[in-house]
Structure formats: C-alpha cells, structure tokens
Image: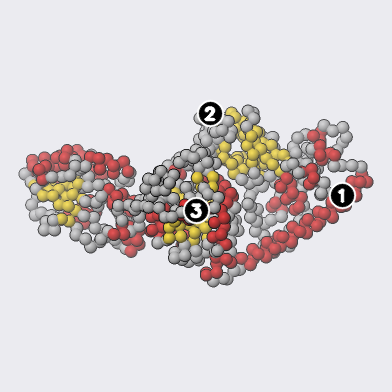
C-alpha cells in the first residue's frame, strides 16, 4: 500500500481538476509480461516481482540466474522499471543492462532476460469493468493500447488522458513516475461505441462534468482529513506511556543500512514501550515447496492462518511488532540484498500490517543471539520511547528443541539462537507453536557453555603450588584450542619475565617457529611457544630442540572447551582490540578437536600445568557483551 503525506498548507496550492480521472485510470489498469513461448507473468501496481530461471518463466538456461531481474509496474504512467540482479546481462529492447542497473519499458516494449534471449513483452490493458466505468465520466475512454482507433470507418477523436502526473497534485510523491502522458492514438471498440451524435454527447458531457465535480470535492475532503491527521500526529506531545496508541506513525516506508544491519520501517509503524518481537523464517513464514531452504524468492507462505489476526490484535493493544532475522547468505553472496528486501515487502503486504524489520546481513554484533539488533531498536529506532522489557516478549523457532519434540515433529531445532536471544535480553520467550497455536511448552536444552557463569575470581592454573616462570632457561609449549586464551595469558604472565615469544601466526610456519626457538636457546633465553600443538608430533619438535640445548621443557595445557573457545572467538570479533587475531572458522576448531591427544609426561615434559580461562575486562560494556550467549 502506498502512503501519501499532505500538509494542510500544501492543499491550498493544489489543483484537483483531474485527480478523480487520474486515480480511476490507475485503478482500471492491469499489466502482464508475455513471452514468445506463451509464459505469462502478471504484475501488480507498485509491487516488485523477481524473474529468472524457473517454472514461471519456462527458462532453463543456467546463464539466466534464478534472480535475474526485478520488475516493478507503474500503472499510472504505464511503464515497468526493470533492475538487473543476475551476473549475466539483460537487455531492454537493444540496450544492455549491467548488474544493479535499471531501465524503463512502456507498453509493447521487450525485455530479454539474459544475453538478448528469452524475450518478454509488456502489455498494459484495462481491467474488465472499464467499459462501465468509462460511461460515468467525461472524457473517459478505454486505455487499451491496441490500435483499434485506426481501424474504424469513421474518423474518431481519441481520448487523451490528463498530462499531469502525481507530482502535480502532491509535493512529495511516494514513487518516481514518468512525466510522459499516456498514448492518445489508441482506443478500444468500447470507447468508439461510447460516442453518439453531437447533441446527445453534449447532454452526456454536462452530466459527466457534474459527476466529476462531486468526485473531486469528495477527494478534497478526504485529503483535508488526511492532512489534519498528519499535522496532529507531528505535533503530538503525549507522554511515553501513551505512545502505543497515539504516537506519530512512520509516514513513508524506509530502508536503512547500518554496517551489516539492514532496517526496514514500514509506513504506519508506531513507537511503543511494548515490543512484540518475532523471527521470520519458521516463525512467520515457511516454504511453499516444503523444503528447509527456499528454492526461489517467492517460495514462501504464511506459516499459520492464526498469525495475521494475532499480530493485528497485538497492535490494537499498543504493541509495536518487530521482526528480527539472521540472513548470513547476504554476506556470503548467496542472497542478493535487493531480493530479500522485495521479499520482506511482500510478506508485510500479505499480512497488511505495519511492521519494523531488522536483518543481520552478516557476522558481528547484530547477529542473533547477540543483542545488537535489539540495542539499535531501543537506542535509535523507537523515536526515543524507552522500551519496557518486562512488558515485551520474543517468539522464534530456533529454540533448542530435541528430535521428536512433538508428535509429527521429527527434526530437532537447527539451533537455539532465538531462545538465547530472548535470554540475553531478559525477555519472555515462546515458540511459534506455543504462541500462535497454544501448544504446551516443549523440552529444550541450552548450550553446554554458559558465559554468565564464568567466574572472574577462579584459580588461574593447577596445581596452584607450581610456578608460572623459571629462573633457569626453559621452553614452555602451549596446547589448546584457538581462542582459548593462550596469547592473552602469555602476554600477561610470561613474556614480561623475559621469555622469547614464538607464534606461528606471526612467523608463518612451524619450521620458522622451531628455528626461532633454537636461536633463542643459543642466546641463553627462555622460550614460550604459543601454538595449538594438538598432537605428539607437533610437540616433539620443541621437546627435541630443548633436549638438544640441554634445557627442560614444560607443557601449559589450556583447559577451555571448544564451546568456550568459539564464544571467545566471536567476542573478540565483535570488540575492538590492540592485538590482531586471525579469523578462526569452524573447520579449524574441528580439526584441532579431531587431532587432539592429551599431553603426557612420558613425552619428555618435566611438568604439565592446566591453565584455566579466567576473564578480565577493561570496562563494564565489554563484560556485558562477553556475558551474552553468542552461539546458538
């Protein structure tokens, strides 16, 4: 739905002579794309449709992307805006489009989906009731673009629609419209039959003029009411507690981009101290195909019929409905932002509700279960209205439920990120089945690692009687997962004591690390080797160097689990730091786990210390972030 905002002062300057005619013309049109093979794609006024390889277009050529172009019809000006999404070029008539470029087609124009192949022709035609409607107004004729007017035996004066665009009536238009008038050379047989002799035509015209005047007066009254309502909203001074029912609504739908965060605020959204939050996939929508992941941009449907009325009821009660979704496919290049934007708009159009939508389009602080999207909502996207978490709640399907958690529900939840998102925020949590269908709570499990329970005052190492450093030259070999705290520990407790720091991240290979160790020992200096060293083979390299130099070798085993190490990894990705860490992906964690062999004294170590991860924080903000669940 398009929303217009008109101020009362602007109404005084408007000319409404043809407004009724303009609206009627747009309402009577329909648009269809027709291919040479007979495939037909209907377009609605102002609604984006994504076309490409698939059954709708009957195109199977793999050079044509499934998301090749986005098309949007403008009925008022009778043109279609085409934006290329796919990697291979599309053509508008003979003009080549590049990725991200747009162009316009009028009635009869042709778009070639890819490489000047698979043509689709644009047809704007009147809907079935145009004949009856044309008899109600002066000058109304069929806007069919077939050349019927040239085939008649009698000379006829074709109808010319109003040449003013919507910009003539409104100071700000919701969409860009061409100033080109509709063609005046074509009219339908219905339009021909609507003309009689001159005398009867004069009489008919007078009656039509009177009818037009009544319609224009009614349009004027409606616009004045809209302007008064808009003005009262803009001047609202209601306290925060009453914003849920009387706050100014967003007048125009807006997309925003903040780093990896995409934010859509639909026209009609109102700020509120009560937030009803929902995930999208598996909560608001599911696939029409029945597959886990959508096969095309339009492979979706509303999950339950109870959803729309329930959301509408929440809004009546003063809640602001907000969707929060992770879409990592955008960062990975598997999902075009424009395609997902159109999908969001189509979902809200189907629901017919004003909703605010937050999209985490990549890794980082905005990705659930981390609180970044919620914090942005509270701090910058709620018109300054403080959010009451005790009255707010969140609904999502990633709830940590096991296999066979309910009859007919054999698959376990793919993660627990939605439940953890609510847990981080301190919000009441529901699954879609619990909230929309009234099902009983299902069993679930939380991750093994809980960052809230990590003790900052715990013992740093075992046995406590051991000494971290030695007065004698030695080699210390670290063993532990990436991101288990090895570097931080060495720089805090070992390097300041004069140990030479050996690290593969900086030296590049284990051979370089071994050589650096040998040089330091020849200089009579102790060495701290900060590598993962999961197996006996990797550790033997340094044991041999120590034995050749006649010094002892100790092992520091860092006890952090894989879950804790992954949490630490995500935390340091989200926080600025003076020390640079290499990005660690899941494959590296799994590789360490696969090859790990617990170190033993029998390998040649003089002592093995167990080093525990005990967090310390430079400020309270860092600690709040660390205490959140970051992995679902």
Compute the Cα span from label 3 to label 1: 58 Å
Compute the Cα span from label 3 to label 2: 43 Å
Which numbered tag is attached to residue 94?
Answer: none
Which residue is found at the position 47% from the left and 47% from the top?
282
> Residue 302, percent across and down?
54, 47
Compute the Cα span from label 1 to label 2: 55 Å
Q: Please name the residue that numbered disc 2 is placed on.
A: 61
Indicate the secondary structure of the residue bearing disc 2: loop
Left or right: 390 in relation to 76: left
Q: Quadrant of residue 244?
A: bottom right
Q: Please name the residue that numbered disc 3 is placed on.
A: 437
Q: Is residue 119 above or below residue 6?
A: above
The answer to which of marks 3 and 2 sits earlier in the sequence is 2
Indicate the secondary structure of the residue bearing disc 3: helix
Mark 3 neighbour density, 10 Å: few (under 14) some (14–19) many (20 or more): few
Which residue is found at the position 44% from the left and 44% from the top?
408
Q: Is residue 131 above or below residue 119?
A: below
Q: Please name the residue that numbered disc 1 is placed on.
A: 205
Viewer-nearest residue: 291 or 627: 291
The answer to which of marks 1 and 2 sits earlier in the sequence is 2
**Residue 496 in view, yes or no:** no
Which residue is found at the position 69% from the left and 35% from the top?
108
């Amino acid at each position: 739905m398009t929303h217009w905002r008109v101020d009362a002062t602007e109404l005084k300057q408007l000319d409404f002579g043809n407004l009724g005619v303009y609206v009627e013309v747009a309402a009577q049109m329909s648009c269809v794309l027709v291919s040479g093979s007979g495939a037909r794609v209907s377009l609605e006024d102002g609604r984006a449709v994504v076309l490409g390889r698939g059954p709708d277009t009957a195109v199977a050529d793999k050079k044509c992307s499934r998301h090749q172009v986005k098309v949007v019809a403008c009925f008022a000006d009778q043109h279609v805006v085409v934006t290329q999404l796919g990697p291979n070029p599309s053509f508008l008539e003979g003009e080549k489009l590049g990725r991200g470029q747009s162009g316009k087609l009028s009635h009869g124009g042709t778009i070639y989906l890819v490489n000047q192949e698979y043509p689709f022709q644009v047809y704007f035609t009147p809907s079935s009731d145009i004949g009856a409607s044309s008899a109600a107004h002066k000058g109304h004729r069929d806007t069919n673009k077939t050349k019927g007017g040239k085939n008649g035996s009698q000379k006829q004066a074709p109808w010319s629609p109003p040449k003013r665009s919507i910009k003539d009536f409104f100071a700000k238009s919701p969409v860009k419209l061409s100033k080109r008038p509709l063609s005046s050379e074509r009219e339908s047989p219905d339009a021909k039959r609507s003309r009689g002799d001159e005398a009867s035509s004069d009489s008919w015209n007078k009656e039509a003029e009177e009818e037009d005047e009544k319609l224009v007066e009614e349009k004027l009254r409606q616009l004045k009411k809209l302007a008064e309502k808009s003005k009262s909203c803009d001047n609202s001074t209601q306290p925060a507690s009453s914003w849920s029912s009387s706050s100014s609504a967003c007048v125009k739908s807006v997309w925003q981009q903040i780093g990896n965060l995409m934010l859509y605020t639909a026209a009609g959204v109102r700020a509120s101290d009560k937030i009803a939050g929902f995930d999208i996939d598996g909560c608001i929508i599911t696939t029409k195909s029945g597959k886990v992941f959508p096969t095309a941009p339009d492979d979706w449907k509303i999950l339950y019929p109870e959803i729309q009325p329930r959301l509408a009821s929440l809004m009546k009660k003063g809640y602001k409905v907000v969707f929060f979704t992770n879409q990592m496919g955008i960062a990975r290049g598997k999902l075009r932002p424009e395609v997902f934007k159109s999908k969001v708009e189509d979902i809200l159009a189907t629901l017919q509700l004003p909703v605010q939508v937050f999209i985490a389009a990549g890794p980082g602080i905005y990705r659930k279960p981390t609180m970044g999207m919620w914090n942005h909502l509270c701090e910058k996207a709620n018109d300054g209205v403080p959010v009451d978490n005790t009255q707010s709640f969140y609904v999502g399907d990633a709830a940590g439920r096991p296999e066979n958690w309910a009859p007919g529900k054999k698959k376990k939840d793919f993660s627990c990120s939605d439940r953890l998102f609510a847990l981080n925020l301190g919000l009441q949590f529901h699954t879609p089945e619990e909230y929309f269908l009234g099902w009983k709570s299902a069993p679930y499990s939380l991750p093994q690692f809980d960052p809230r329970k990590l003790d900052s005052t715990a013992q740093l190492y075992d046995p406590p009687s051991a000494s971290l450093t030695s007065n004698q030259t030695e080699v210390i070999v670290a063993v532990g997962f990436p991101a288990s705290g090895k570097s931080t520990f060495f720089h805090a407790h070992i390097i300041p004591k004069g140990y030479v720091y050996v690290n593969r991240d900086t030296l590049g290979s284990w051979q370089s690390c071994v050589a650096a160790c040998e040089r330091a020992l020849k200089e009579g200096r102790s060495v701290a080797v900060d590598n993962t060293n999961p197996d006996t083979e990797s550790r033997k390299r340094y044991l041999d160097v120590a034995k050749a130099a006649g010094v002892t070798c100790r092992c520091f085993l860092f006890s952090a689990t894989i879950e804790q190490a992954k949490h630490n990894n995500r935390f340091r990705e989200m926080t600025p730091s003076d020390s640079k860490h290499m990005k660690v992906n899941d494959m590296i964690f799994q590789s360490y786990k696969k090859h790990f062999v617990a170190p033993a004294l029998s390998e040649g170590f003089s002592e093995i210390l167990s080093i525990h991860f005990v967090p310390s924080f430079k400020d309270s903000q860092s600690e709040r972030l660390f205490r959140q669940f970051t992995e679902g």
